[in-house]
Amino acid sequence: TRQELLKVMRTIDDRIVHELNTTVPTASFAGKIDASQTCKQLYESLMAAHASRDRVIKNCIAQTSSVVKQLREEREKNLDNLTLLKQLRKEQTKLKWMQSELNVEEVVNDRSWKVFNERCRIHFKPPKNE
């Protein structure tokens, strides 16, 4: 299902947060390891993960919105068709769920970037255009 797919796609953030906490030293240990390469790789992984999840969610929203629109139009022509009404309600519920996933995504991303910035701000400066 879509929920399982998003859950799997979000595990990369958990892995990256874990890796940040275990491999990138705090400021007091910064001299003992070259963390800039690790931070750069983790930055790229986070950017790619966030972009792909965003794309998946927005594609689902676009597809479902189109189905809802089509079902609404059909429903207007067949007001007494209960099967059509049930289908429409089901798709509208799916659409609301997907839109709420964008909010969940924002929370997940914020948490990951917070840890990234805590651990990597002294080791790696992300490119300005992103």
Image: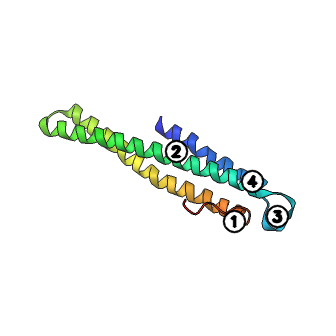
**Residue at coordinates 40% horizontally, 46% vertically from top-left?**
97
**Residue at coordinates 31% horizontally, 43% vertically from top-left?**
65
Q: Which residue is mark 4?
A: 37
Q: Assign a secondary structure to mark 3.
A: helix
Nearer the camera: disc 4 or disc 1 = 4
Q: Which mark is residue 57?
A: none
**Residue at coordinates 65% horizontally, 54% vertically from top-left?**
43
Q: On the image, which quarter does residue 33 sit in?
A: bottom right
**What residue type is disc 2 on?**
Ser
Q: Assign a secondary structure to mark 4.
A: helix
Q: Kindly report the distance in space between the C-alpha atoms of the residues bearing marks 4 and 3.
A: 13 Å
Q: Assign a secondary structure to mark 1.
A: loop
Q: Which mark is residue 52?
A: 2
Residue 31 horizontal side relative to residue 107, left or right? right
Q: Earlier in the sequence, mark 4 or mark 1?
A: 4
Q: Which residue is mark 1?
A: 121
Residue 85 horizontal side relative to residue 112, left or right? left
Residues packed near mark 3 inside 10 Å, few (<14), some (14 to 19) or many (20 plus): some
Q: Which mark is residue 30?
A: 3
Residue 34 in view of the camera: yes
**What residue type is disc 4 on?**
Gln
> Which x, y percent locates residue 58?
42, 46
